[in-house]
Image (tube, grey):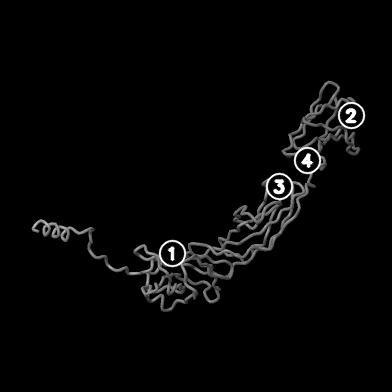
């Protein structure tokens, strides 16, 4: 009997498990929003944020009572700022990403602060996000773009009248096979030359967006209307330069500088006798020299050189030189 009592006492003392110290109740304080961004696009503020729906203890909130997003002029403290700041209603408040567009009317040339906080289902209020400071400027002017084809590529131009100092422009390009315009360049002047892989008979479309300084950031305009064209190479090469002549044996030896035209096909040699008109004498492919053996001693000749490309475009003859055959 004594042995049985000892065994029972040990069982009561040791138990079948361990009960630790009681845990404090969950506070259900919403986690601080850490993803908050804003930019000025045209006549609107575009505000984005991400609400995780978690508590400061790492627990998941089943629902949210409120997401308090506000914007307004700076104040000496967040409490003072919140009193005068406008609220953007968010219904229903859920854990997700948000994007809001707010008109800038009445905010031009002012500094504003944007912040957000979350209220949990029990009324517990999370901390304000890191305040986001933004300087609002008048709506940036939308560029009016013109596209012009040239021998070096496609040139874009747009008037800069009314653009504030320090304005730059983002250029977008779209061509056949592309679903949407692609960022192509950032221009600091109201003109840009597109030389990148311009192809014959290929359609090109361009849009330009102004970027206006706004404090430590910039405000972007709406995109311009598309300006485009189908590229056609109808541009002759530059006339060859550096033509020179020396006397040979019963000949006049000509030489000139090579053309930089990427699709150069040939050079044309032009000759005039005395004061007569220039007449095409010969065509030279792959060389920058020519020997004129159809000359008479003591006679005056004038020479000039033109160039043609693979599309059949031919330049005017370059600067003519005179020479007397020996």
Q: Of callouts 1 and 4, which one flags the residue occurring earlier in the amino acid sequence?
A: 1
* Residue 198, numbered circle: 3
As helix, strand or loop, the secondary structure at mark 4 comes to loop
- What separation in Å lies between label 3 and label 4 (alpha carbons)? 22 Å
Residue denoted by label 1:
52
At horizontal 36% and vertical 62% (from top left) the residue drawn is 58
Residue 322: x %, y % from top left: 83, 34
Q: Name the residue carrying label 2.
A: 299
Determine whether label 3 and label 4 are within 8 Å by CB: no
Between 142 and 158, the one nearer to me in the picture: 142
CA neighbours of label 1 inside 10 A, class few (<14), some (14 to 19), many (20+): some
Read off the residue under disc 4.
239
Earlier along the polypeptide chain: callout 4 or callout 2? 4
Number of marks present in the image shown:
4
Q: Is residue 23 left or right of residue 1?
A: right
Which of label 2 and label 1 is nearer to you? 1
205 sits left or right of 82 in the view: right
* Residue furthest top as drawn: 249
């Amino acid at each position: 009997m004594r042995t049985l009592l000892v065994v029972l006492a040990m069982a009561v003392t040791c138990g079948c498990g361990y009960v630790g110290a009681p845990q404090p109740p969950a506070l259900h304080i919403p986690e601080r929003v850490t993803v908050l961004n804003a930019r000025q696009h045209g006549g609107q503020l575009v505000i984005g944020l991400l609400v995780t729906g978690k508590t400061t203890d790492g627990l998941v909130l089943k629902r949210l009572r409120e997401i308090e997003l506000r914007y307004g002029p700076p104040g000496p403290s967040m409490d003072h700022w919140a009193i005068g700041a406008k609220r953007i209603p968010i219904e229903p408040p859920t854990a997700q990403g948000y994007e809001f567009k707010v008109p800038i009317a009445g905010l031009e040339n002012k500094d504003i602060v944007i912040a957000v906080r979350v209220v949990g289902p029990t009324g517990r209020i999370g901390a304000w996000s890191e305040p986001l400071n933004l300087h609002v400027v008048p709506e940036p002017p939308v560029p009016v773009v013109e596209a012009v084809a040239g021998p070096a590529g496609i040139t874009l131009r747009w008037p800069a009248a009314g653009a504030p100092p320090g304005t730059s422009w983002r250029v977008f390009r779209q061509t056949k096979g592309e679903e949407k315009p692609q960022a192509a360049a950032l221009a600091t002047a109201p003109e840009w030359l597109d030389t990148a892989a311009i192809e014959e008979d290929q359609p090109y479309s361009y849009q330009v967006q102004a970027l206006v300084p706004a404090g430590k950031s910039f405000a972007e305009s709406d995109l311009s209307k598309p300006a485009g064209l189908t590229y056609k190479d109808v541009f002759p090469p530059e006339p060859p330069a550096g033509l020179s002549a020396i006397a040979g044996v019963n000949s006049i030896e000509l030489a000139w500088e090579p053309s930089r035209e990427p699709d150069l096909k040939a050079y044309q040699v032009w000759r005039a006798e005395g004061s007569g008109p220039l007449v095409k004498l010969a065509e030279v492919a792959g060389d920058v020299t020519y020997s004129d053996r159809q000359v008479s001693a003591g006679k005056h000749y004038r020479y000039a050189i033109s160039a043609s490309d693979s599309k059949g475009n031919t330049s005017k003859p370059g600067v003519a030189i005179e020479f007397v055959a020996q």
